Image (spheres, rainbow, N blue to C red):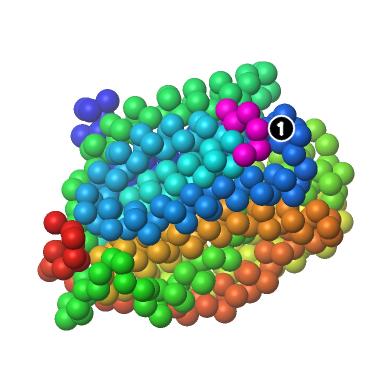
Amino acid sequence: MADTMSFLSPQRLVMLVFFLQPVAFGSWLPRIPEIQAGLGLGPAALALALLGMPCGTLITLPFAGPLVAKIGARSAIIWGFVFYSIAASLPVLAPHPIALFIALMLAGSAISFVELGLNVQADLVEKSSGKMIMNTSHGCWSLGIMVGSLIGSGFAAIGLAPQIAVPLLAALVLPVAMITGSALPRLHDAPTEGQAQKSAWSLPSPALIGICLFVFGITMTEGAMADWSAIFLRDALSAEGGLVGLGYSFFAFMVAAGRFGGDTLKRTFGAVNTARICGALAVLGGVLLYFAPGVELALVGFGIIGVGVSVGFPLAVTAAAGIGDRAASANVAVLSFVALTGFLIGPPLIGFVAEHFGIRFGIACVVPFLLISLFLTGRLTPRPVKTNHNPEADVPGVL
């Protein structure tokens, strides 16, 4: 395995670890209905349990930014994967709703830490090599969660209990992820020349706040599609059997396709115009999904939404890391908190709305947030970043 790693460039190593990270979590998604039924939870009760993940994120990310700045993105990836692999296995083992909430809280904490390391590492490799890889890396992440979801569905099809299937997959992925993470280069981020460095604990700048507000609607939609697409097809359009899982498959495939083409689009049209084109598509797809009279048109809607949200978060990571007012890891930590909060709050929000107004109206809740994201695309204007200084040296408490 080590010999294989020597033939991989830093860019490909980053893409590989992005692919590996969500596999175990992806295998949990198709087992949610089984866990829901086993614990006897209705939509609102499940929504409350799902709030455990954003709670874990809320607790972790304020500390994760300074910690990643101190130990480095590479170390954060390696050690984060260990805790993540354990935490990702806990939700399927929960014996009651409170335990499910706690398990999801631990999973959200672990996911937020390792994903922060991934995004900072991708940005550093971009800066050191001069090659755009952020969108492609997130495309690999989309493939990873899609593969994990397919494996989870396959395990369900052969009757392997989720309590065995998810921990088994997490255990299989962990050693590969550890070897890949160990092969990543040790890199450090740098500030914009002439700007004083703020502490990692300081309040986010107006520029960062705008980028965070942009990304919230994007990742909220991603979370909504992950948890509610199958239920939408079943309850709103009376889909049965294998058809109910096609919505997320279409969505995930088009997210991956959009991200793999995202770096080319960015080079051609620029970050802001790329975000505007895709943002308009996301809104169009959301409207189409709400009015879809049948499964076929709904699948088209899922696919259009997938393309629309595909490049939003990768573009936001690059923009946040390039602000230059403090270590990139600190700004990306704030962005990751907002992004993961959107991803994890979206499903509970839709659950509460669907409980009272139906799933069609519930899933349409993403459209107003997508419109806000479209309005804020101008916040992604790139900033020049020079690499002649290590910003961690100027952050109090960072060695």
Q: How far across and down, in percent of the image, does residue 21 sit?
A: 43, 40
Assign the N terminus to one quadrant of the image.
top left
Q: How far across and down, in percent of the image, does residue 374 sit?
A: 58, 74
Assign the C terminus to one quadrant of the image.
bottom left
Q: How far across and down, in percent of the image, does residue 331 sit?
A: 34, 66
| Badge 1 amino acid | Leu
Query: Viewed as shown, does residue 154 lie left or right of 396?
Result: right
Q: Residues within 10 Å of mark 1 (few under 14, many from 20)?
A: some
Residue at the spot x=25%, y=44% of the render? 75
* Secondary-structure class at tag 1: helix
Residue at the spot x=31%, y=77% of the render? 383
Residue at the spot x=37%, y=73% of the render? 204
Would residue 296 be visible to someone looking at this image? no
Q: How far across and down, in percent of the image, does residue 214 sit?
A: 51, 71
Query: Viewed as shown, does residue 146 lie left or right of 187?
Result: right
Picture quadrant of residue 155: top right
Query: Viewed as shown, does residue 60 lie left or right of 248?
Result: left
Q: Count of labels shown?
A: 1
Would residue 13 be visible to someone looking at this image? yes
Write the start and end of the magenta stretch as one range: 92-98
Query: Viewed as shown, does residue 195 lie left or right of 162?
Result: left
Tell me, yes or no, whether the highlighted magenta stretch contains residue 241.
no
Residue at the spot x=44%, y=54% of the render? 59
Compare residues 303 and 287 and report the one nearer the observer: 287
List the residue tagged with mark 1: 39
Q: Which residue is the extreme one toward the front?
A: 98
Compare residues 258 and 121 and report the one nearer the observer: 121
Tell me, yes or no, whether the highlighted magenta stretch contains residue 95.
yes
Q: Is residue 3 above or below residue 256?
A: above
